[in-house]
Amino acid sequence: MYAGMVRVRSFEERVRELFAGGRIPGFTHTSIGQEAIAVGVATALAEDDYVLSTHRGHGHLVAKGGSLRGLMAELYGKATGICHGKGGSMHIADVSVGYLGANGVLASGCVVAPGVGLAIKRRGSAQVVLTFFGDGAANRGPFHEGVNMAALWKLPVLFLCENNRWASTTAHALSTAGGSIAARAAGYGIPGESADGNDVLAVWDAVSRAAERARRGDGPSLIEAHTIRWVGHFEGDAQLYRSKDEVAEGRQKDPIARLRASLEALGLLDEAHAARIHEAVAGEIEDAVAYAEASPLPAPDDALTDLFVHYPWRE
Amino acid sequence: MPEVRYVKAIADALAEEMARDERVIVLGEDVGAPGGTFGATRGLYQQFGKERVRDTPISETAIVGAAIGAAVAGLRPVVEVMFMDFIATCWDQVVNQMAKMRYMFGGQVRLPLVVRTHTGAGLNAGPQHSGSLEAWAVHVPGLKVVMPATPADAKGLLKAAIRDDNPVLVLENKTLYAMKGEVPAGEHVTPLGRAEVRRGGSDVTIVALSRMVGEALRAAETVAAEGISAEVIDPRTLAPLDRDTILASVAKTGRLVVAHEAWAPCGVGAEIIALAAEHRGAPRVPRGASEGGGVWGAMSGPPTLMVRRVTPPHTPVPFSPPMEKLWLPDAARIAAAVREVMG
Ligand SMILES: Cc1ncc(C[n+]2csc(CCOP(=O)(O)OP(=O)(O)O)c2C)c(N)n1
């Protein structure tokens, strides 16, 4: 878990540098400060479980075991990217690790997930699907339609809200009636739980219990994980809308430092071991960057592929 | 050949495909025990059970979203959206998810799913229950779109759509549900992307969609008595469009009338006329510039081209019978347009 969070953080920090240096085109949202959620979820889920992600999805994919090379190359817009350069930061997917896609349209995963749950149910496997969404997205209709459908049909779906207090520049309190997202579960007759999203073990615990319940056939759960994003909504965001104190609070609640302190107190991690982890992760990330740098750009007419499965009318 | 109603042809297609492939499931509002608002899923619930024929909450976004998720995870869902007007409520799922997902994920996923919905005025259903919005769908890359005009095609196109590995919108016409017609017995699959020449002719080409196919055939009959030979083409699939059949006909006639129930601006008729115009005299269009269907052969278009569109006025569909009657294009108006292009 420690290595997982370090990997997500280091990946995102490198993405910020590369973006600022003009190596990564387009728009990018990073998840620095929110690593405990991505890693708590990935640790609680099995390898063949599915996740659906959001516009802030790099960390979810890194934690789920996606290829760092393929992801970095995708962010660069290279032909070797996991989506061959067609998706980019907000539209990444790596089906090989059960990551069925980020989504540029907020809350969309909430309605796609019940369908994945339906397929799991028909297959009769013990898998689950977890969909991430933000607190802002919880105010969109698809959240309500998806939770209702999954609850009604007792589908193996986990709804995981990452409440980082902001939807772009709009504060949670200015957009969300009732305050608690977790409390909305009551309306659909499913468990709703608030978790400390800066505590990887708390996230792991909540997701593990929800997954177990779903695997038993008892249906979906809603988890609201409270966290703080340390950086802008997107890369380049001046963040004039929030006080510096909040970022300071986030740093003080740093999920990585927190886990490290617990592990050290238990004698499970020491300085030297931690240094080895950081070094190994840095190596993985530099390898991904080197791969992305060295990879070719797509040929322009690659734009004409991947739309349909076959193109009989072109033959 | 047995005579079957259009709506029964749909139910037969669904039942045959469900029996053929375990992965096919049906989802929608009232599609279960009641058999659908218009009876298009009648009998399926009884035959295949509630796991495979699911009545859904009134959640169009979740219905289509769930179909997408189910398709990505290995099923072949067929969903029903009650009236095409309501597809506006889940248009994000259609345009941003279903149509883009395979492309934006670099081909990692397949979306073998079908959205059935119905279009069409003529039943006094009023402004929010009569729309024909096929042009919206045809505009979007990544979707296949069919509009069956006969019971045989209602069955054959739906079966082909269910077997296709891409998302397909099947736009039925609710006024045709009661129509009887011959449907070949046994396995009957109509390949997507092939137009049907419903009547041969040499003076003018009429391309008509859905219910307007019948009106166009009546119009062709009328003008035949006046010595005008009209060819009537039913594209059947709007995306990918069978350009060859249309262009070959127009190359021969040099006159083109299009007829549909959707509004004229940016409608499928406008697209077909543009296609014919691009080919007038000049055979080639660069590959990829206008991707979507048909093979660009070395076929040359006609030296001159006369065109007319037969479409409703640019208003919502009015409720009251006399107004709706004026609103809906018919054989007389198609015949009038034919006479105009004949000059
Ligand atoms: C349907 C939709 N509306 C608006 C946007 C633009 N947008 C992108 S991110 C964002 C804020 C999202 O807030 P939240 O769901 O809390 O997630 P966070 O960015 O905090 O992770 C907005 C408004 C969008 N992508 N999709």
Image (tube, rainbow, N blue to C red):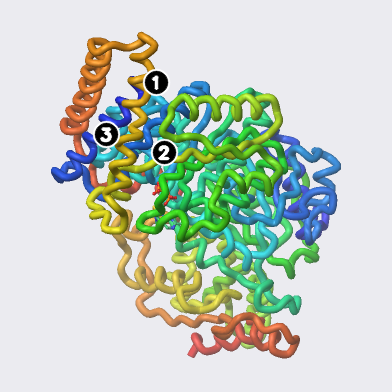
Residue name at image x 49 percent, y 77 percent: B256
* Crowding at mark 2 (Cα within 10 Å: few <14, some 14-19, many 20+): some
| Residues at marks 3 and 2 on the same chain | no
> Label 2 is placed on what type of residue?
Gly
Mark 1 surroundings: few (<14), some (14-19) or many (≥20) residues within 10 A: some
Q: Is residue B24 visible?
A: yes
Which dot marks residue A1? 1
Q: Secondary structure at mark 3?
A: helix
At label 1, the amino acid type is: Met
User: In the rendered structure, which amino acid carries the disc numbered 3?
Assistant: Met
**Chain on which label 2 sits:** B
* Residue at 35% over, 57% down: A169
Question: Can you give x and y, in whole percent of width and height, for residue B180 in the image?
Answer: 80, 63
How far apart are labels 3 and 2 at the CA level? 18 Å
The crowd level at tag 3 (other Cα within 10 Å; few <14, some 14-19, many 20+) is many
What's the residue at 23%, 42% (across, down)?
A299
The residue pinned by badge 2 equals B107
Q: Is residue B123 left or right of residue B295?
A: right
The secondary element bearing badge 1 is classed as loop
- Looking at the picture, how far across and down is residue A123, in whole percent? 66, 27
Identify the secondary structure beneath mark 2. Answer: loop
Distance, label 1 to label 2, CA atoms, is 32 Å
* Tag 3 near tag 1, CB within 8 Å: no
Instruction: Compare residues A24 and A263 and report the one nearer the observer.
Output: A263
Q: Nearer the viewer, residue B146 or B41?
A: B41
